[in-house]
Amino acid sequence: MNNNYFILFCILAIISQVQSVDPSCKGIINTNPILHDEPTFVNSVPNGKRFVVGSGYDKINIVHLYGGTPYDMGLALGKLMSEDLQHLVPEYFAYLDNKIEDLIKTLPPLVAKWIAELGLLGALDLNYEITRFYTPPWYDEELRGLAAGSGISYENIRRLNLLPELIKAACSVIGAWGQSTLSKTTLLHLRSLDWDEKAPIAKYATVTVYHPNTSYEGYENHFHDYYKQKYSGSYTFANFGYLGLIGSIGAYNEVSVGLGQKVWITKEQDITSRFGNPWTYVLRDVVQ
């Protein structure tokens, strides 16, 4: 595995809460040590290999997915991580269901209304209906492969992947360069995954390294339909996030492009439209 991917993820993983000069900030300095262990091989299937590093709550899955079609890569991920996914998905949705009254208070009014009227799963299904016409087909293909390989229903795998789109996410990102760095010459990019550390998904930190088939016809035939530009090839890249999420919330590719996002929504009017390609998929297509 490329050491750059692993080192970058370590930086992202250990800095989940940062102390601020703002007295209203309740965050604390994260003193967890950086993991320096070599990844341990677990198993392999056609189109995929799985490694792990760390243990317990600090365990990180490292999964490599190779070529073929998006369905093939999803199938490989599902087979490699089936046992974990069969624990994670029902446990996470049950956790969210129990927390729903508190969550609604923090969400934009429109989303809170959807959840109140339709329930969380219904709101995620509605989000799918209003975004699917804008979503490139390779994501649905990969999700179907992931469902087939893991034994989790396609609907629940799809819902899991639309959670960031529904809530629009609000993690932290920092870009530092010049006088803000010790070297004064290096650009540093930090992507902090500010997810609830008590949520079941927090136990499944995962680096998914994609080695896409650059000649896959789906990209060539449909890329322009969704992005109005010619497809020019794909790069190997690593997604840093949690098991089962195929979109990008933090990523880094072989040509040294690092990717993160920050959404700042104070009112529903800040969202210009709920229609469109989910942002995690857009970001993945940028980095791959």
Image: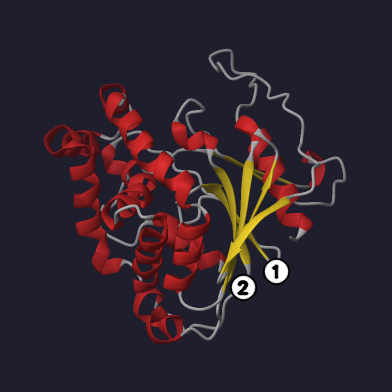
Across and down, in percent, residue 282 comes to 44, 62
Mark 2 Cα within 10 Å, few/some/many (few <14, many 20+)? Answer: some
Residue 208 relative to residue 53: left or right: left
Q: Which residue is mark 2?
A: 235
Residue located at (45% from left, 58% from top): 78
For the C terminus, which image quadrant? Answer: bottom right
- Element carrying mark 1: loop
Across and down, in percent, residue 187 comes to 75, 51
Residue 155 relative to residue 160: left or right: left
The image's colour scheme reads secondary structure
Q: Which residue is mark 1?
A: 255
- Element carrying mark 2: loop
Disc 1 versus disc 2: nearer the observer:
2
Mark 1 Cα within 10 Å, few/some/many (few <14, many 20+)? Answer: few
For the N terminus, which image quadrant? Answer: bottom right
Point out the residue furthest to the right here.
Answer: 183
Which corner quadrant of the image does residue 259 belong to? bottom right
Instruction: Give 118 or 57, whichever is nearer the viewer.
Output: 57
Amino acid on which disc 2 is placed: Tyr
Residue located at (58% from left, 20% from top): 27
Reply above or below: 97 against 142: above
Reply above or below: 236 against 52: below
Instruction: Give 163 or 43, whichever is nearer the viewer.
Output: 43
Is residue 105 something one can see in this rendering?
A: no
Amino acid on which disc 1 is placed: Val
Q: How many marks?
A: 2
Instruction: Give 237 or 285, whichever is nearer the viewer.
Output: 237
Mark 1 touching mark 2, by CB under 8 A?
yes
Which corner quadrant of the image does residue 55 belong to? top right
Reply above or below: 119 against 218: above
